[in-house]
Image (tube, rainbow, N blue to C red):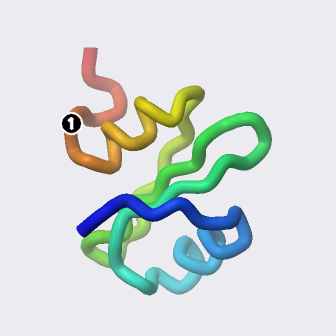
Amino acid sequence: MGIEKLSYSALREIIDNRVPLGCFYAYYGGVFVAVDNQTGEAWTECFNSLDSCKKWLAGEFEVGDK
């Protein structure tokens, strides 16, 4: 399953409705908003860089890891 770039309004729909499943991000308000909805729980985090955003969505680190 890949990481898909969406508009912020489409990302909000996923957060609100928990479908479709997958990993998504949008650039909004000067940050990258990432949504991991692989399990239908719409885990959401904000990042200052696209690289960090994609790495989190790929499961390379957890927010709060040192």
Residue 54 lies, with reference to residue 19, above or below; the image says above
Residue 62 lies, with reference to residue 25, above or below; the image says above
Residue nearer the viewer, 17 or 54: 54
The number of callouts visible is 1
Residue drawn at 54 percent across, 28 percent down: 49
Residue 47 lies, with reference to residue 57, above or below; the image says above
From this viewpoint, which residue is outermost toward the right?
Answer: 29
Residue drawn at 34 percent across, 71 percent down: 22
Q: Position of 53 compared to 39: left or right?
A: right
Inspect the image, locate mark 1, and give the three-letter code of the amino acid beneath it.
Glu
Residue 58 lies, with reference to residue 30, above or below; the image says below
Q: Quarter holding the N terminus?
A: bottom left
Percent x, y of residue 27: 67, 48
Q: Position of 57 compared to 15: left or right?
A: left
Q: Position of 39 compared to 6: left or right?
A: left
Look at the numbered disc 1 and give the secondary structure of its residue.
loop
Percent x, y of residue 65: 26, 23
Q: Position of 38 compared to 16: left or right?
A: left
**Mark 1 burial class by Cα count in 10 Å: few <14, some 14-19, many 20+:** few
Quarter of the image for residue 3 reads bottom left
Q: Which residue is mark 1?
A: 60
Percent x, y of residue 58: 26, 47
Residue drawn at 78 percent across, 42 percent down: 29
Percent x, y of residue 66: 27, 14
